[in-house]
């Protein structure tokens, strides 16, 4: 099997997120901008945690909001809860087939590494999406989750018992990354000693190249992705020899819809599973600590009544919204929210905004661990692309807090977190905390 892909001059092309980030390093508050100047794609808004006002204004004044970039062409920000559900529900009109993040216009000659691989099932429409998704669904079926929970709990207990008492440490690297990467290595049956590679690959998938950043160029990004292909190619061949198994790689190797694809061709699915199993869970784990510190009355309520953990989990996932948006592409001229959408226009469904929609969630900016409708959040998507691993993510967060509460008086955040430079991954890179044991 060959891992060879064409060698495009990636750095000759201006990525849409790069263009917008470069254009707006100092983004004024939303109330200082003309409506047509608002563009929530800017990654600086998310690294600075200043996106809320921009989406609040769009929800009130222009819920389906038009922007255009030289690199991406025409695109719309969909910011209201019901409009997001409408787009998510109609895959025939609003297709996933051209990608899940803002990209080059349909039909563009601009090459990207990911467009040279077969797309992941999240970037497909039925029936292909349905068949490939079915291949790996058993990994997160209720029976398998029941089998995984004791292992998740054991690892969580061992990690929490190893944490320093009364000393500052970084929650992101020490807890969130370690727990989620260990779980991901188990799901892939990935060599445990190499599990840090999964974190690295997850981090660079949607990283915006910049000096001193996660990656400095599109070419570096591509080269590291090829290392990922080479590594999984070896696992691929190993699982072929082993026969059918319960890990994700074995399921892809032997699944009817995926068995004839090589590791390079199947990179999209592999990266989807890596990011879905790593980035999203680790950022809700970190977000839970940060949120409860921002709302100490909710933390006090939780400590007084640990039975509230199960209701807290969906509320944390709503409040954090680990992936800010997903893209769809219009397959025909149509209308949404009174706006004329053209065929091939891109639409960004801003989950982070829909989860703050006051028409659905009262006092939506606030954390309320007893919120009655928290489970209606859009963080896992909606419709045919609803997150397959949602129950596993919920279980990991639930188990973490079931084991934190009996061990520690409180987790105290020491300073504001450092955040991911991305408008797609709404995450954290550092969160200094102190824990005091009971």
Image (cartoon, rainbow, N blue to C red):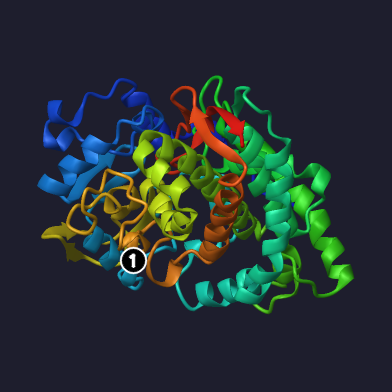
Point out residue 10 in the picture as x, y percentages from the top left corner.
55, 36
| Residue 294, image quadrant | top left
The answer to whether residue 378 is left or right of residue 68 is right
Which quadrant of the rendered structure holds the N terminus? Answer: bottom right
Which quadrant of the rendered structure holds the C terminus? Answer: top right
Point out residue 104 in the picture as x, y percentages from the top left corner.
40, 46
Residue at 68% x, 28% y is: 164
Residue at 56% x, 20% y is: 212
Of residues 91 and 356, which is closer to you in this image? Answer: 356
Label 1 packing within 10 angstroms: few (<14), some (14-19), many (20+):
many
Point out residue 386 in the picture as x, y percentages from the top left corner.
44, 67
In the image, residue 130 sits, relative to residue 239, either above or below, namely: below
Point out residue 215 in the picture as x, y percentages from the top left corner.
58, 29
The answer to whether residue 339 is left or right of residue 165 is left
Of residues 416 and 268, which is closer to you in this image? Answer: 416
Element class at badge 1: helix
Residue at 29% x, 65% y is: 85
Would residue 20 be seen by someone viewing this image from the given angle?
A: yes
Of residues 229 and 410, which is closer to you in this image? Answer: 410
In the image, residue 121 sits, relative to residue 160, either above or below, namely: below
The residue singled out by tag 1 in the image is 88
The answer to whether residue 247 is left or right of residue 15 is right
């Amino acid at each position: 099997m060959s891992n060879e892909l064409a060698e495009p001059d990636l750095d000759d092309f201006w990525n849409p997120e790069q263009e917008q980030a470069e254009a707006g390093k100092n983004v004024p508050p939303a109330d200082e901008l003309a409506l047509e100047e608002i563009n929530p794609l800017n990654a600086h808004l998310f690294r600075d945690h200043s996106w809320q006002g921009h989406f609040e204004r769009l929800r009130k004044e222009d819920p389906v909001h038009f922007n255009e970039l030289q690199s991406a062409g025409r695109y719309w920000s969909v910011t209201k809860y019901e409009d997001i559900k409408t787009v998510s529900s109609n895959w025939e009109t609003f297709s996933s087939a051209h990608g899940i993040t803002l990209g080059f216009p349909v039909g563009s000659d601009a090459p990207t590494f990911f467009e040279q691989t077969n797309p992941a099932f999240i970037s497909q429409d039925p029936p292909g999406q349905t068949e490939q998704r079915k291949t790996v669904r058993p990994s997160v079926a209720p029976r398998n989750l029941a089998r995984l929970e004791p292992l998740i709990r054991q690892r969580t207990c061992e990690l929490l018992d190893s944490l320093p008492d009364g000393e500052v440490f970084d929650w992101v690297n020490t807890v969130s990354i370690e727990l989620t990467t260990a779980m991901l290595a188990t799901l892939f049956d990935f060599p445990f000693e190499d599990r840090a590679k999964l974190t690295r690959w997850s981090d660079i998938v949607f990283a915006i190249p910049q000096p001193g950043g996660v990656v400095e160029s599109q070419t570096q990004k591509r080269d590291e992705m090829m290392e990922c292909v080479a590594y999984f190619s070896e696992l691929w061949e190993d699982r072929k020899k082993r026969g059918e198994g319960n890990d994700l790689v074995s399921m892809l190797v032997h699944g009817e819809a995926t068995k004839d694809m090589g590791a390079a061709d199947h990179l999209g699915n592999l990266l989807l599973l890596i990011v879905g199993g790593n980035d999203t869970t680790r950022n809700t784990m970190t977000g839970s600590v940060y949120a409860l510190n921002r709302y100490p009355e909710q933390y006090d309520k939780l400590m007084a009544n640990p039975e509230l953990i199960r209701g807290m989990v969906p509320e944390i996932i709503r409040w954090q919204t680990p992936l800010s948006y997903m893209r769809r592409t219009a397959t025909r001229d149509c209308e949404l929210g009174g706006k004329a959408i053209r065929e091939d226009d891109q639409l960004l469904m801003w989950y982070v905004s829909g989860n703050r929609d006051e028409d659905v969630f009262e006092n939506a900016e606030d954390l309320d661990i007893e919120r009655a409708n928290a489970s209606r959040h859009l963080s896992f998507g909606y419709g045919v692309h609803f997150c397959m691993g949602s129950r596993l993510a919920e279980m990991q967060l639930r188990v973490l807090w079931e084991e934190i509460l009996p061990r520690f008086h409180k987790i105290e955040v020491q300073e504001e977190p450092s955040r991911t430079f991305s408008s797609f991954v709404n995450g954290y890179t550092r969160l200094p905390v102190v824990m005091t044991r009971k």
